[in-house]
Every structure is written in structure tokens, then in C-alpha cells.
Amino acid sequence: MTGSAESRRCAMWVTASPRAKRTVLFCWVLFALVNLWAMWRFPEGETIPFHFVWISIAMVFGVNSWPLAGMLTALVAVTGSTGAIMVDQAVRGVIRFEEVSEVPLMAAVFLVMVWHVRGRQRALVELQRVAALERQRGETQELFVRLGSHELRTSITVARGYVELIRSAHEDQQTDDDAGIVLDELGKLDRLTGGLTTLMRLDSPVGTAPLDLDAFLERLVRRWVPVAERRWSCDSRVGTVQGNAERLQAAMDSLLENAIAFTQNGDSIAVRAWGEPPGFHIEVSDTGRGIAQEHLTHIFEQSWSTRHGDARGGSGLGLAIVRAAVEARGGKVSVTSSPGTGARFTLTIPDPIQDGVRRASPAPLSVERAKTEH
């Protein structure tokens, strides 16, 4: 890989440097003149220098990428000089006249090569143009989402404050109900903007560091326990992994929020993790409504908004965030479920840390222990 990259850098340098172009052109002219002299001086062995001349012009054209006029000038010069020598040798009876046909044949082969090279160059230029447009479009989209999310969240916060003031200033039930609806809708907008911002962040590169996965998952579950009355459990026996806590938390928060949305009070939500070279697995399972089979292939799409035919009531970005976060680490996410049996999401993430570095994990976290400490 290093040698290949170095070769590409050298080729780019030769192509880009005018001085290098002149040096290569001068060396080629000198090399061609030497071989033309050898063709004239040693007619019995003209085949080798003849082909050297044609091979060298093909190589120089590939390195220098001459303009059309320069290429045609060089082609005419090579065709004329090699053709004149071979015609002279055929007239003197040194070679047969049939061998002179090699000159137009080599010129035709060179023209075909030029046609392909120039077509490839045009394709590369177009590809670079399209890539630049895509890069600019992506940067514009990211800037729009970031600025839009910030402005939206500011407006949502202000609007929520005024709705709360209106709600507290009126004691009638109708106003309270209407204010509750508005607050719910503002909450949905807030989650949507947060999801969009998270997706944008997941597209940018990020560093990794050693992460105590067992302690991380235990803290994560403890944080969610007060949010919903579920039977929570966490059993992680992995130890230290190489990862990014912010990205992994974004994925896990989305999975747990999804599990809460489709379970009821008293249902179970379990987080389990285990190491399996060359990486580790994290599983989030619940005993909720489950997912219909026809939805399993679409649930990680950003537009997916139903589960078992019911409205999700969310932004539809949660599981897309999970997939983006895991795939950014070279991993994958899978799901198994059926209606009425709950759902089981499994994250499979590669990990360069050897098993020998991992330490023993703590005891599994149960909901009773979590509730006591909260």
C-alpha cells in the first residue's frame, strides 16, 4: 500500500511539474534518436529499436498527457522517421516490404491507446467535478441542518416557556389540554432537530480511546431507569474496548428510547454485552409489541415510521442513528422480532483490543439495585 501511494505521488508530481515534463520530453527525444540511429546503423536488428521507439512514445504520452496538437506532432515525427528508415532498408533489400506495414499498424495502435487514455481523462475530470459538487452539497446540507437545528431549538425553547406560562395562568381544563398538546408537538420537534444534528455528527470522522464497556453500559441503564417503569437489567461481560463513548451513547440512547416507546409499564428491557473476537456484541431486547416481518427490512431507514402498523409518534431517525453510528465503526446492526414477542437488536462492533487486555466485568445490574441508588 505504501509503495503504491508513493508511486501515485510520483506520477502526480511528474504530471504537474513543468520542469519534470521538459526533462521527461528531453530524455525521450534523446532515447528515440539513439534507437533511430540504431535502426539505421544495424538494419539486420532494426526490430528491437523500432519497438523501443514506439513503446517509449506511449509511455511518455501516459506520463505527460500531451495536448492533441503536441501528440499528433510527435506521432507524425515518429511515424515519418521510423517509416523512412524502414522504406530505405526495404529498397536496399535488407528487409522485406511487408515489414514496412508495421509502421502504420503501430501508429494505429498508438491512436487507439490515445483514444482510450483521453476518454479516461475526461471521465476522471467529470468524476472529480461530480465529487466536488457532492462534497459541496454535503457541506451545505450539514451547515443548513446545524444552523437550522440550532435556530429551531432556540425557538422551541422560547415557545415551550410561553406555553408553560399560559398553562400556569389559566386553570380551566380546556386550556390545560390544549397546552399539553402544544408541548407534545414541541417535544417532537425538539427530538427531530436533535436527531438530525446527531446524524450530521456521525458523518464526521472521530477518534477512539479505551472504554470500559461494562461500566459504560451500567451507567447508561441507570440513567434511563427513572424515565420509564420497566423491569431493567444490564449484564455486560466485555471489559475494556476501543471505542468512542459519544457515538456509542447516541446509538444506545436511540435503542433504549425505541424500546421504551414500544413497551408498557411492567415490560422488560434488557441490555447484554459479550466479547467475541474480532470484536464485541451489545444486545438490547424488550418484551413489547414486537415488529411485523414486513417492517424488518426497513426499520433502519430514516423514513421508517411504523412498527406493527402503528404510528411511531417519533422522528423516525432513532434507528437510522443506530445504524450510522455502528457502521461508522465498521460494524453492523441486526434485529429479530415478531408481533407480540418483543424485539432484539444486536450491535456487532470490531475491536482491536486483545482479549488478554480485558478485565473481569462487574456483577449484572438489576432494576432493584438501580432503583435503590436512584
Image: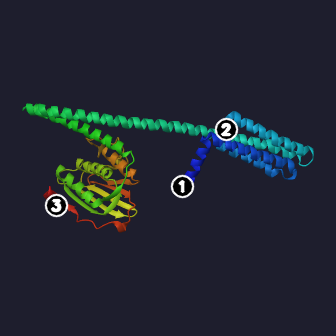
Place residue 63 in its image quadrant: top right
Cα separation, mark 1 vs mark 3, equals 53 Å
Quick check: 345 above or below 88? below
Q: Position of residue 234 (x, y in %)?
A: 24, 60
Label 3 residue SS: helix
Q: What amino acid type should be assigned to the residue bearing mark 1?
A: Thr
Q: What amino acid type should be assigned to the residue bearing mark 2?
A: Trp
Name the residue at 20% across, 37% down. 184
Circle 2: is it few (<14), some (14-19), or many (20+) Cα within 10 Å?
some
Which label's residue is closer to the chain start, 2 or 1? 1
Name the residue at 87% across, 42% down. 87
Q: Position of residue 249 (x, y in %)?
A: 29, 51
- Residue linked to disc 2: 66
Label 2 residue SS: loop
Q: Position of residue 47 (x, y in %)?
A: 81, 51
Cα separation, mark 2 vs mark 1, equals 29 Å
- Residue linked to disc 3: 369
Quick check: 287 above or below 98? below
Name the residue at 39% across, 54% down. 331
Q: Could one spot residue 268 in this view of the protein? A: no
Q: Position of residue 46 (x, y in %)?
A: 83, 50
> For this rendering, which residue is in front, 200 or 229?
200
- Residue linked to disc 1: 2
The numbered dot on residue 10 is none
